[in-house]
Image: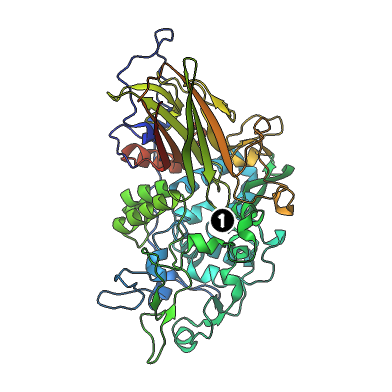
Amino acid sequence: MSLRRAALVSVLAAAAACGSQSSEPAPAERKPEPTPPPAWASATGDMLGPLPAASKTTSTRFTGAEDCGFCHSSEAGSKTLKDAAGRDVSPYNSWKATMMGLSTRDPYYLAVFRHELDKKPAAAAKLEATCTRCHAPMGSVERLAQGSSVHYDDLVGGKGRDQVLAREGVSCTLCHQIRPDNLGTPASYTGGYVIGEDRRIFGPHADPFVVPMQNHVDYTPEYAAHTEKSDMCGTCHTVITRALDDAGNAVGPEFPEQTPYLEWLASKFSDAGPEGKTCQTCHMPAVDDDGQPIQSPLSIRPPSGLKSRTLKGRHVFRGGNALMLRLLSENVEWTGAKVTAEELLAQSQRDEAMLGLAGTVAVVGARREGDELVVELEVTNDAGHKFPTGYPSRRVVLHVTATNAAGAVLFESGKIDEFGRVVRRDGKQLDGAGAVLPHRDVITSDEEVQVYEAVMADASGKPVKALIDATRYVKDNRLLPRGFRADHPAAAMIKPVGVEGDPGFGNSDRVTVRMKKIPAGATITAELVYQTLRPSELEALSEAPSPAALRLFDMLRRSEKRATVSARATATAP
């Protein structure tokens, strides 16, 4: 379900509870305690200006995506790189509206990057080397060869070669030049990919016709099996960090900041055989939107006789960041990217659909015990990694309501206010600064909420406000992928935290909800509500807001939000 709000702002799924507002007053025994608006909602100051416009450039290693798009895009009136329904499936046109193509123009990334630099300026060299290796990889590779790094100011200004390459994000000639040398090993993690210097372009199609590419962009294409393996994705989708002290020195143990690849590796999805799936299987589907294979020459400008092929994977890079794509669609001129608002909105909707495949919730039982209605819910992860996964700002809230025939809310757990905060029915915030909502096996009131998330903490177990202070997770009850093997070597760093009292937790999670005074015939609704940004992330940025953070806040304030409910189930109370 997607709902629009005219309120100040919500954070991705904040509108999930829209329509669940009750005309029934708060319980008489509890005085209403609405929480004041958060600081970020009214923060003012100089905002980060528009990012420099994308432009063409080339280096000894890299060529910009627009040059690749000269051949690997589609055109009006042409059937090349279109599916049977005439829809554009070309690599360039698909990629440019994705978070891969916009990884350096992501306002949240820029705000967090600046926040960490301001928090520990002595660590600038390490932060810049780490934070640009995967978000600005072409610039990072070029600067590393010079003994330097891409700086924050390079991303938000400047028109030099390395700066232009950096702002192009995860681009064509970066991924397609990654060598197989160390893939699948710890040496490849945290951006440890290897780029050659011989201008060879690797791809999944056998016997490529090399002359056009050699003539146009001075690359030689060749078949490479590793381009279809998850190991290549794992280079940037496994990020291991260490906390830094004020002097910029690494302290504490290795910390698994984000680990989708390791989660996949320890699951049944990594098994060989028909049930196995790679990252590309789901995130780069080899079929059109109707589920049909796509037949086309791979170039809009083929020489005579270039044969049609079955596409191995569309460059849509479906993911879970529908929020950011929507924000960018509403601020397309600010991005400086060569993409339209319509293309960004379409990709946001594609990501919302992807979230709809990630997990399910079901009402598996409803019974009476005295004056209580007891509802059994089962939440299941259908993704090939944890749900949710990726950067630990993301969470899924289990939103449960009971409504009578008139639509009045009789019970509600997991209510989300207009600022994205989890609140009681009377508006009192439950996930305030420093709060860690515990994993729940049983819910009995609006103060008890099941939230699937990872909460970073320091060595003492105190939740932290910045990745550079994190040494461990104080909570990680994100649902595990099917067939998760806790004894797999890849699982050592990614086991659940805080679920010890729930022996049935794993790929699915059974949650019992006990409600009082619910009449027969009431409607029970359970939703999985996905949020890209928890309120705690925005609260941390608002303590000393940079121009980048203020720009992000402004985008959120002005945006009409769309809730992402990844799954829903309903039942009638007996």
Q: Does residue 388 appear to the left or right of 130 in the view shown?
A: left
Q: Does residue 409 appear to the left or right of 227 in the view shown?
A: left
As drawn, 364 above or below 21: below
The residue shown at (74%, 43%) is 253
Nearest the eye: 291 or 215: 291
Q: Residue 422 at what x, y percent from top left? A: 46, 28
Q: Residue 244 at what x, y percent from top left? A: 68, 42
Going by the numbered disc 1, the residue's amino acid type is Thr
Q: Quadrant of the C terminus?
A: top left
Q: Quadrant of the N terminus?
A: top left
Nearest the eye: 279 or 69: 279
Q: Is residue 234 visible?
A: yes
Nearest the eye: 401 or 279: 401
As drawn, 395 above or below 160: above
The residue shown at (52%, 64%) is 280
Q: Is residue 43 visible?
A: no
Structure colour scheme: rainbow
Label 1 neighbour load within 10 Å: few <14, some 14-19, many 20+: many
Q: Residue 494 at what x, y percent from top left? A: 67, 46
Picture quarter containing residue 78? bottom left
Q: Residue 162 at what x, y percent from top left? A: 51, 65
Mark 1: which secondary structure?
Answer: helix
Q: Does residue 215 appear to the left or right of 505 in the view shown?
A: left
Nearest the eye: 298 or 191: 298
The residue shown at (37%, 69%) is 89
Farthest residue to the bottom: give it.
304
The residue beneath circle 1 is 132
As drawn, 327 above or below 173: above
